[in-house]
Amino acid sequence: MADKIRCSHILVEKFSVAQQILERLKKGESFAALAQQYSIDGSRKRGGDLGEFGRGMMVKPFEDAAFALKPGEISGIVKTEFGYHIIKRAS
């Protein structure tokens, strides 16, 4: 199991917005472009890139979802106290 992984995410406040973004991703739209357009945190400037992180560095629901992904995979909608995330694992 990987000690560290690299992920990007899109964070929004509303579940309905996360659903719309997920549908657009499934149609092949750019994850980075959608992150820049919609994400409500500082990672939006980097296309949602969160860099590398290990276990214990992110809130539990986010960490569990991120580490369950294979490189290149995109998660479903993950709820945390910050809002609704869509996570893409890079490595």
Image (tube, grey):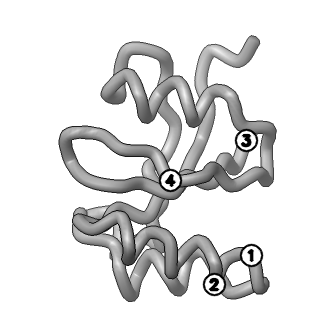
Q: Within the image, what quadrant is residue 61 found in?
A: top left
Say what amino acid the circle numbered 1 marks.
Answer: Lys
Task: Give whichever of discs 2 and 4 has the lower sequence position.
Answer: 2
Q: Is residue 17 above or below residue 72?
A: below
Q: What element carries label 4?
A: strand
Name the residue tied to disc 1. Answer: 26
Q: Is mark 1 on a helix, strand or loop?
A: helix
Name the residue tied to disc 2. Answer: 24
Task: Give whichever of discs 1 and 4 has the lower sequence position.
Answer: 1
Residue at x 38% of width, y 73% of height: 16
Which corner quadrant holds the N terminus? top right
Which corner quadrant holds the C terminus? top right
> Neighbour class for label 3 at 10 Å: few (<14), some, many (≥20)?
some
Q: Which of 57 and 76 is in front in this view?
A: 76
Task: Give whichever of discs 1 and 3 has the lower sequence position.
Answer: 1
Say what amino acid the circle numbered 2 marks.
Answer: Arg
Name the residue tied to disc 4. Answer: 77
**How far across and down, in percent of the image, does residue 2 sit?**
71, 18
Task: Give whichever of discs 3 and 4 has the lower sequence position.
Answer: 4
Residue at x 53% of width, y 24% of height: 64
**How far across and down, in percent of the image, does residue 90 sit?**
69, 50
Say what amino acid the circle numbered 4 marks.
Answer: Ile
**How far across and down, in percent of the image, does residue 85 sit?**
42, 54
Q: Which of 89 and 61 is in front in this view?
A: 61
- Labels 1 and 2 touching (C-beta < 8 A): yes
Q: What element carries label 3?
A: loop
Name the residue tied to disc 3. Answer: 91
> Alpha carbon of mark 2 to alpha carbon of mark 4: how far?
13 Å
